Image (tube, rainbow, N blue to C red):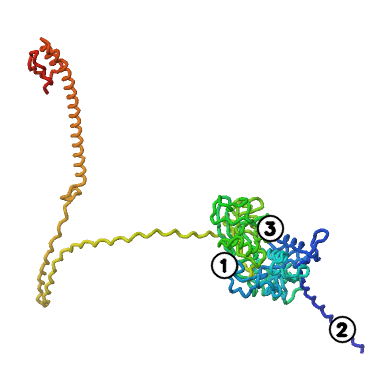
Amino acid sequence: PPPSPPPSPPPPSPPPPSPPPMPLECTLDFLSSNLYGHPVPIKDGHLVMEFVQMEGLLRDQALANSYDPFTCSLDEQPFFECLDIGSARTLGKTINSSIDHYNEDALDMSDVIDLESTIANMSEIFPVFGGGSSSQCSNKTVGDGVINVFDIAVIMWYQFKSEPYNRLPNDPSSVETVHGRDETQYRCSTNETRTQYHLALGRSHCTLGPHAEPFRMLSEVPASRVTLRNAQTLRSISNGPDNMREMDVNVLVWAEHQGGKWYRISCGGIQTVVELFLTGVASELDIPLSPLPAPDYECADSTKGCVPLKEDSIEVRFQRRLELVDFGAERIRDRCAAIVAGVQPFSTMLGNTIAVRQQPPSRACAFDLFLWVPDFPQPGQFSISHTQYDAVRLAQLGAVGTQRRRLQEHQYSDPCVLAGSSSMSAVGGLILTQTACAKRRSSPPPPLPPSPPPAPPAPPAPPTPLAPPAPPVPPAPPAPPALPPRRPQEAPAPTPLPTPPPPPSPPIAINGTIAGQVPSTTSSLLFIVVFVLILVLCCCISVICLCCFARGKLRIRTASKNFTSQETLSKPGATETLADILIHRNRRTAVQVVSKTPDTPLPSCIGMP
């Protein structure tokens, strides 16, 4: 028989799976520039290139309202993961023994714990980069997956040797920082906003973003990198054990003027670094942190410090709460840290983001921010109360939030602090989960007027006369016994009841007037008649007086003429002539000549008629 064919060789074994990528070994100094100014992963002994790249990415993210400028750059430049060295959780576990005693009304760090006495050897116990000791992902120290003000704060604290970074080596190329996150580059072009990512980050430090569903992310991850660890991380994204604390934010309308409004933004507790996302106001220009004092509550235009330097420009100021208790300027300067802009001295606000940090963090004090929002901002700045173009640009910068519907309905309101804003404190990272909008301080109710004195007791009412008692009604006589039906007989008529006396008749009214009373119309008529009679009598008396006055004047004139004529009568033969003259002048007057002799004088008056 023919020989049997040789057995087929066994199938080749599959190639071994590719090993997972080696974690990055990042140091604080890892970048330099080539001849063209482009970054290359070469150490140069200083942190200039690192700071320049952080600042550029931060500006691009603020103006785009997205972290795509950072996440999308990791495909070509994966070493940019080493720029993500801080988060809101950095330095958060340094005083974990005092977390239960944290007081949100504290004014400075000494009210919580004496940091300078406990933070000296902190770098030997706790990591001072990334998310802190308990916020590790895959047993690696990683940042928060973005470039923000927390990364700027960490590199500046090391640069100026602030506690606890003053214990680190002076050579930044020998300072180990983070090891890089695994799937940060896969968040590129996922349409996530900054506030959405920070809300997911507040639930878990190892989050892959708000849109990281397992079926979508696994389909985008290359097959060579699909591991059990990736799937477990995706499934447990929302079950982070290190949720951040809730940040207490209060926005208050502080003062109103003709050109704009002042707002006070308060964060509870002591914040070493603050990053706030606003609605209703944004700027494409860098807004510096003003050193001017904060305005007084409801200050007037003429008050010093109440009006901003430029009424058409956004302005940001601050005030330490120790200043409200008259702590003293020198003591505040010796006890509290410097409050500076988050990125650069001339840039504390860009886009819709306000970023502020304190240096050094061990001497941080509680403070409030004051924001001036003009009604008509200059070009490059946008306000929700200006034009429709401002509303469109505000939406592009992410400064709308819950006000998107109001913008569509043209209903404008005051600015708000968006959910997703975060801060770094000595007791852990804080996250704002509910948007905080501006409110107005409720005025105290006006004092009540003094109560009137009690009224005197009313006099007792006079006793009401009792009506005469009704006469007793005699009982009805008993009914007669029933008669047999054979002999019907009518019942006797009942005895009539006595008629009660009739009530007294009311007084009879005649023409609407009760008898015995004088009607009001008759009284008025009688008064008018009496007044007319008195008036007529007065007129008569006046006429009589006038007549008497006229007659008396006539008598005086006649008598004067009579006395003048005495000389004529004394002459012989003149008696007849004088009598004729008197009769002619007063025919109604009977002149009696007493004596016609010249020796008899003429009477001194004339008789009355």
**1 or 3: tag closer to the N-terminus:** 1
x and y percent of residue 303 in the render? 56, 52
Give the residue displayed 10% in from the left and 69% down from the top.
Answer: 495
Q: Residues within 10 Å of mark 1 (few under 14, many from 20)?
A: few
Total numbered labels placed on residues in the image: 3
Give the residue displayed 11% in from the left and 22% down from the top.
Answer: 607
**2 or 1: tag closer to the N-terminus:** 2
Give the secondary structure at mark 1: loop
Instruction: Please give the residue where the numbered disc 1 appears in the rendered image.
Output: 105
Instruction: Please give the residue where the numbered disc 2 appears in the rendered image.
Output: 8
Name the amino acid, label 2: Ser
Gap between marks 1 and 3 measured at Cα:
28 Å
Asked if the residue at tag 1 contacts the one at tag 2, i.e. Cβ–Cβ closer than 8 Å, the answer is no
Q: Quadrant of residue 58?
A: bottom right
Instruction: Please give the residue where the numbered disc 3 appears in the rendered image.
Output: 345
Along the horizontal axis of the image, is 427 left or right of 1? Answer: left
Q: Which callout, 2 or 3, points to the residue nearer the camera?
A: 3
Task: Locate the N terminus and report the quarter of the image it occupies.
Answer: bottom right
